[in-house]
Amino acid sequence: MRATVHRSVAGLAVALGVVLTAILPASSATAGEPVQSPDTGLVFYSSYPTEVVGRQATPDGVCRPVPVDATWLLAWSGGFHSVSGYRTTDCTGPAAELNNLHSWPTGYHLSYRAG
């Protein structure tokens, strides 16, 4: 009986993992990833505690959402010349330059464009 329960629980765990992998968006940064120095690409960080909350490998000019817990970013590599932050979700309205180690309150910038 116990072996059957253990197999059932293991099967459910595997099924849940497959479903979450299919549903959740891909991200090269795992929530709570520890800070690395040096790092690569454009890296978004949270402040308390300081953790990596998002990344972009190279600039592409596409409007993207700012990671929810991000409060600052640093362009380690990849040729990022300009990172514009917006208070809207669609990169419209006034832009703020973020690539010179600026910080902001959580949720202040909702989207960004890296060029």
Image (spheres, grey):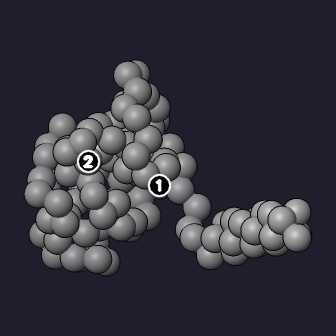
- Nearer to us in this view, 82 or 37: 37
**Residue count near mark 2 (Cα–Cα under 10 Å), binned few <14, some 14–19, many ≥20:** many
**Whether residue 79 can be seen here:** no
Give the number of callouts: 2
Residue at the top extreme of this rendering:
38
Q: Quadrant of residue 61?
A: bottom left
Q: Earlier in the sequence, mark 2 or mark 1?
A: 2
Q: Which mark is residue 49?
A: none
**Residue at coordinates 43% horizontally, 64% vertically from top-left?**
62
Percent x, y of residue 41 = 44, 38
**For this view, does 109 lie left or right of residue 30?**
left
Residue 60's disc is 1
Mark 1 neighbour density, 10 Å: few (under 14) some (14–19) many (20 or more): few
Asked if one can make out residue 43 in the rendered structure from this viewpoint, the answer is yes
Q: What element does badge 1 sit on?
A: loop
User: Depth-wise, is mark 2 or mark 1 nearer the camera?
Assistant: 2
Amino acid under disc 2: Ser
Rendered image: mark on residue 46: 2
Determine whether the residue tagged by mark 2 lies in a helix, strand or loop: loop
- Does residue 94 appear to the left or right of 23 in the view shown? left
Quarter containing the N terminus: bottom right
Q: Residue at x 29, y 44 (%)?
A: 45
Whether residue 52 is situated above or below residue 16 in the rendered picture: above
Residue 91 occupies which quadrant of the picture?
A: bottom left
Residue at left offset 88%, top offset 63% = 3
